[in-house]
Image: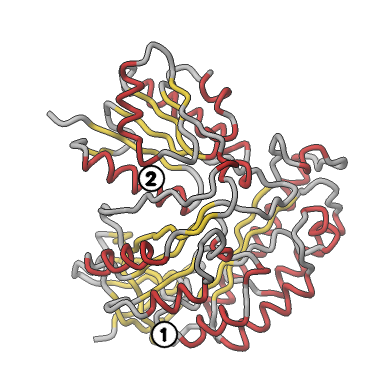
């Protein structure tokens, strides 16, 4: 009987990609991969450490795995493991700690942990690595879109962020490896390819050849059969005229850019070490909208950063409203040990963070509705993802510009592109009818 492995993923799309890759490695070694709430021989918790909540959730998942099978090997992987291996090793039940390298050796390390008399610490010094770790996904399970990791690491060192210490310096994947993975995924029938990484706008750094993200997009777009190419999060300073032109002129590139703002107040941005101001951000957004009409611009905002006053927050609130983002992910500031901001004066009380978060989330809901309402009565192409109501035969999918659309069909349309006409709003989504 095959051994069973279960993986739980916290955090970003890069983590999702890496979990898929590890799942594939287990399957190729004869394991059956099962949901995390089932009994397994090996449990992998792929962690996030962007906030303290990620750390706490990681510990909770270890305890859950121990309850499911006290005899299982429990491995903690990823950013939390990388930055706090000693802390992770002290969690009862942990047998193996791996950071953000050597995921390709996951099965060998599990075998080592099975024989070891004590928990195994396989975490490496990530800051010393300069090469990209190849961790390709050779088989996805039941997905309509496929992620392709093109880059690793970050050198921005924003004052609040632990990620440069968790992921190490910037490294870029060889373009030939990226193109080969994209080609394989298209041949397997994936309708949408999503480029992901920690700092994809820095793509090209660390490679011998001179290239950048815009060059890579152009090369990927030439792949036969490509229907949609979506870009992951891109830092404001990496939005170049060449990149905007690529999005504008290449039909298969989705009209959707996720650009983290973090604050709409210039003094807070300076304290965050973000290296741009609101005027520059606004000008960049204007350039995108001038060249790529109907683009969805989504963003991230942190509330309650140390020293943020009510006036600072109101500036952020007003700026987010003026920008009309189609989606704003709101985060409450969480001190990360080892970052400069953790020692800043003026730490904002929790109740103030809660209040500001709720106000910004309410504004975001209005922005989402306003953006979606602009597409009422439009004919749009939707990638069908899943049935959300079987009784009503109600499907859910995404347009290229990141609009969530609901439509009815009795057919199995998962992974197919469907032409619909939007008829009315339903919350922040659009309700549509399939065009015959």
In the rendered image, is residue 365 in sight? Answer: no
Question: At 32% from the left edge and 80% from the top edge, which residue is drawn?
Answer: 433
Residue 149 seen: yes
State the residue lying farthest toward the left: 1
Is 166 in front, or is 129?
129
Q: Decide: few, some or many residues near mark 1? Use Cα within 10 Å; few <14, some 14-19, many ≥20.
A: few
Q: Does residue 196 appear left or right of residue 50 in this picture? A: left
Q: Is residue 389 left or right of residue 89?
A: left
Location of the N terminus by quadrant is top left
Task: Name the one closer to the observer, 253 or 384.
Answer: 253
Q: How many numbered discs sit on the rendered protein?
A: 2
- Horizontal and vertical percent for residue 21? 34, 48
Colour convention: secondary structure
Locate residue 288: give its quadrant: bottom right
If you read the primary sequence from the N terminus, does the residue marked by circle 2 or circle 1 appear first?
A: 2
Query: Which residue is under mark 2?
Result: 19
Which residue is under mark 1?
251
Q: Along the horizontal axis of the image, is 276 left or right of 235?
A: right
Q: Position of residue 252 (x, y in %)?
A: 39, 80
**What secondary structure is marked by label 1?**
loop
| Circle 2 SS class | helix
Q: Relative to 431, say whether 138 is above or below.
A: above
Q: Residue furthest front?
A: 208
Q: Which mark is residue 22?
A: none
Q: Residue at x 60, y 58 (%)?
A: 329
Q: How far across and down, in percent of the image, does residue 138 sit? A: 27, 54
Which residue is drawn at the image coordinates 39% and 59% (left, top)? 147
């Amino acid at each position: 009987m095959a051994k069973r492995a279960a993986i739980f993923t916290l955090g970003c799309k890069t983590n999702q990609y890496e979990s898929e890759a590890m799942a594939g490695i287990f399957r190729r070694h004869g394991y059956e991969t099962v949901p995390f709430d089932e009994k397994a021989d090996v449990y992998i918790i792929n962690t996030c450490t962007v906030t303290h909540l990620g750390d706490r959730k990681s510990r909770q998942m270890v305890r859950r795995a121990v309850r499911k099978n006290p005899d299982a090997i429990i491995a903690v992987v990823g950013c939390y493991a990388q930055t706090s291996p000693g802390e992770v090793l002290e969690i009862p039940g942990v047998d193996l700690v791996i950071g953000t390298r050597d995921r390709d050796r996951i099965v060998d390390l599990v075998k080592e942990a099975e024989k070891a008399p004590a928990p195994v610490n396989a975490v490496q010094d990530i800051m010393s690595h300069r090469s990209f770790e190849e961790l390709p996904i050779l088989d996805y399970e039941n997905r309509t879109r496929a992620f392709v990791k093109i880059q690793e690491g970050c050198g921005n060192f924003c004052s609040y962020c632990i990620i440069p210490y968790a992921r190490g310096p910037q490294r870029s994947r060889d373009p030939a490896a990226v193109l080969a993975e994209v080609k394989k995924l298209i041949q397997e029938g994936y309708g949408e390819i999503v480029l992901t990484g920690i700092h994809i706008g820095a793509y090209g750094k660390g490679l011998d050849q001179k290239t950048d993200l815009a060059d890579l997009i152009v090369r990927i777009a030439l792949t036969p059969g490509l229907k949609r190419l979506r870009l992951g999060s891109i830092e404001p300073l990496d939005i170049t005229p060449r990149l905007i032109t690529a999005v504008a002129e290449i039909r298969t590139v989705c009209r959707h850019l996720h650009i983290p703002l973090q604050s709409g107040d210039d003094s807070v941005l300076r304290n965050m070490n973000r290296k741009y101001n609101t005027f520059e951000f606004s000008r960049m957004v204007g350039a995108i909208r001038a060249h790529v009409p109907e683009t969805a611009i989504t963003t991230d905002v942190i509330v309650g950063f140390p020293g943020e006053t009510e006036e600072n927050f109101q500036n952020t609130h007003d700026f987010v409203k003026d920008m009309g983002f189609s989606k704003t992910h709101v985060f409450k500031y969480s001190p990360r040990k080892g970052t400069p901001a953790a020692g800043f004066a003026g730490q904002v009380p929790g109740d103030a963070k809660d209040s500001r978060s709720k106000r910004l989330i309410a504004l975001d809901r209005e922005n989402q509705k306003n953006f979606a309402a602009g597409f009422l009565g439009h004919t749009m192409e939707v990638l069908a993802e899943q049935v959300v109501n079987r009784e009503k035969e109600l499907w859910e999918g995404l347009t290229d510009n990141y609009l969530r659309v609901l439509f009815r069909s009795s057919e199995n349309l998962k992974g197919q592109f469907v032409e619909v006409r939007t008829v009315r709003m339903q919350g922040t989504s659009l309700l549509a009818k399939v065009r015959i």
